[in-house]
């Protein structure tokens, strides 16, 4: 059974502004890097998209650990999502939660695969977290 580690990050120049996402996927000692960008987006969307794109890339067989420096992503998928779903994707103000479509896709993966969500402190020397950040910023530069 595979043990897959994924490090993700999102970045945005302006919020909203041009954004990028990056992910480092480690499986069986193989390292794969992916990145992409969006125009007129937010940092939170890029954080979510980094995880989605990484999960689309792996086959999902085995245990998956996702490392993120986004408390929005970590808390959203491990805590807040239960109430969002119970309340038909409405927040406490009875408004549709932001980035609902992205959360629904992450939730789909979370229900299919055995995923552990881990938080890492940003810019704290974690090699793969730093690399995911670099990839997100490279994607922004490449779009200009």
Image: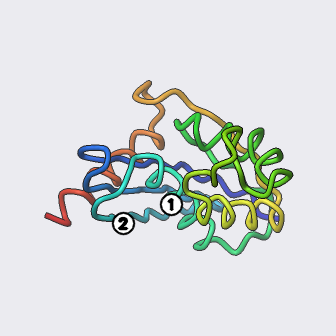
Horizontal relation, residue 118 to residue 17: left or right:
right
Viewer-closest of 81 and 35: 81
Task: Pinpoint residue 102: horizontal percent, then vertical percent.
Answer: 59, 62
As helix, strand or loop, the secondary structure at mark 1 comes to helix
Q: Image quarter for residue 4?
A: bottom right
State the residue at coordinates (64%, 61%). 27
Residue 128 x/y as whole percent: 47, 43
- The image quadrant where one finds the N terminus is bottom right
- Label 2 belongs to which residue? 36
Query: Is 72 in front, or is 1?
Result: 72
Q: Residue 117 placed where, x, y %?
A: 71, 44
Residue 45 vs 120, above or below: the answer is below
In this rendered view, identify the residue nearer to me: 82 or 64.
82
Where is residue 23? Give x, y as percent. 48, 56
Q: What element carries label 2?
A: strand
Quadrant in which the C terminus is drawn:
bottom left
Q: Earlier in the sequence, mark 1 or mark 2?
A: 2
Between residues 41 and 74, which one lies in front from this camera angle? 41
Is residue 69 rendered to the left or right of residue 100?
A: left
**Residue appearing at x 86%, y 52% in the figure:** 86
Residue behind mark 1: 49
Q: Residue at x 56, y 52 (%)?
A: 98
Q: Residues within 10 Å of mark 1 (few under 14, many from 20)?
A: many
Identify the residue shown where x is 58% and y is 39%: 72
Give the spatial CA distance, label 1 vs label 2.
9 Å
Q: In this view, does 67 lie to the left or right of 10?
A: right
């Amino acid at each position: 059974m595979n043990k897959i580690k994924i490090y993700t990050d999102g970045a945005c120049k302006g919020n909203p502004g041009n954004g990028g996402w990056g992910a480092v996927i480690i499986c069986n000692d193989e390292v794969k890097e992916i990145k992409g960008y969006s125009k007129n987006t937010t940092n939170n969307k890029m954080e979510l998209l980094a995880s989605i794109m990484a999960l689309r890339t792996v086959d999902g067989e085995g245990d998956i650990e996702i490392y993120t420096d986004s408390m929005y992503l970590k808390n959203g998928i491990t805590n807040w999502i239960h109430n969002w779903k119970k309340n038909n994707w409405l927040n406490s103000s009875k408004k549709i939660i932001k980035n609902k479509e992205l959360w629904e896709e992450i939730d789909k993966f979370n229900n299919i695969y055995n995923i552990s969500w881990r938080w890492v402190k940003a810019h704290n020397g974690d090699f793969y977290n730093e690399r995911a950040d670099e990839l997100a910023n490279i994607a922004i530069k490449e779009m200009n």
